[in-house]
Amino acid sequence: MCNLRIEDIDWRAESIRIRNTKTRACSFLPLMVPVGEAMLAYLQTGRPAIDAREIFVRTRAPYRKLGMLASMVRRRLDDAGVTPVGRGAPMLRPCCRGDGCCPAGRASSRRSVAP
C-alpha cells in the first residue's frame, strides 16, 4: 500500500491495481464504494499538495511517500484491541476478500484466502 500510486486506481472500473514489489506482478482488487469515497476525500482534503504520485504520503514535512506500514498498522490494531492472526502483511490478506473478514479472522494460511 505504501507504493499505491494515483494511476493504480481505476475509478470507472472500480478497481485497484496492486503491484507486487518482488515479482512485479499485478493483482486487481475491487474498489468498494466506502473505500473509494474515503480515498477520494483524503485526496481532496487530507493529502498534502505535493507532486508525488504515491497516494499515501507523510502528513508532516518532509512530505514524501510512506515507508514501512507494519509498525503503524500494529499500533492501530493494538489501540483497537484487535489481535491479528499472524504477522506482517499476511495478517491483512483476509480483508482483501471483500467479505467483511477482519485481521482477527480465522484465515490460517495464504492459500485459504487466495481468490
Image: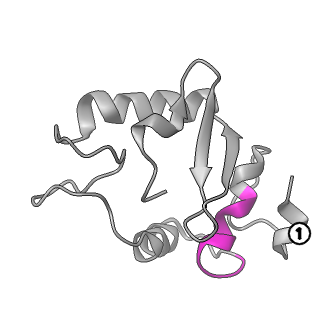
Q: Which quadrant would residue 67 be assigned to in this image?
A: bottom left
Q: Is residue 64 above or below residue 40?
A: below
Residue 52 position within the rendered picture, expressed as x and y whole percent measured from the top left: 25, 46
Residue visible at 16% across and 55% down in the picture: 63
Number of numbered discs:
1
Q: Secondary structure of the magenta portion, mostly?
A: helix
Q: What residue occupies the far front of the structure in this picture? A: 24
Pick whichever, 79 or 17, lies toward us. 17
Decide if residue 45 is on the left or right side of residue 85: left
Give the residue drawn at x 68%, y 72%.
90
Left or right of 35, for residue 94: right
Query: Height in image: 102 above or below 9?
Result: below
Work out whether residue 8 or residue 81 is closer to the camera in this orientation and state it: 8
The relative height of residue 115 versus residue 34 in the rendered view (above or below) is below
* Above or below 96: residue 32: above
- The residue lying at 11 percent from left, 61 percent from top is 62
Which image quadrant for residue 95?
bottom right
Q: Is residue 35 left or right of residue 69?
A: right
The secondary structure type at the circle numbered 1 is helix
Q: Look at the image and name its color scheme.
A: one colour
Q: Label 1, on which residue?
A: 111
Seen from the viewer's position, the closer of residues 112 and 75 is 112
The percent position of residue 59, horizontal first and vertical second, equals 20, 53
- Residue 61: x, y in percent? 9, 58
Point out residue 100 in the picture as x, y percentages from the top left corner: 75, 46
Q: Residue at x 25, y 40 (%)?
A: 47
Toward the left, the furthest residue is 61
Residue 64 in the magenta stretch? The answer is: no
The residue stretch that appears in magenta = 85-94
At label 1, counting other C-alpha atoms closer than 10 Å, the crowd grade (few under 14, some 14-19, many 20 or more) is few
Q: Residue furthest right?
A: 112
Q: Nearer the viewer, residue 58 or 22?
A: 22
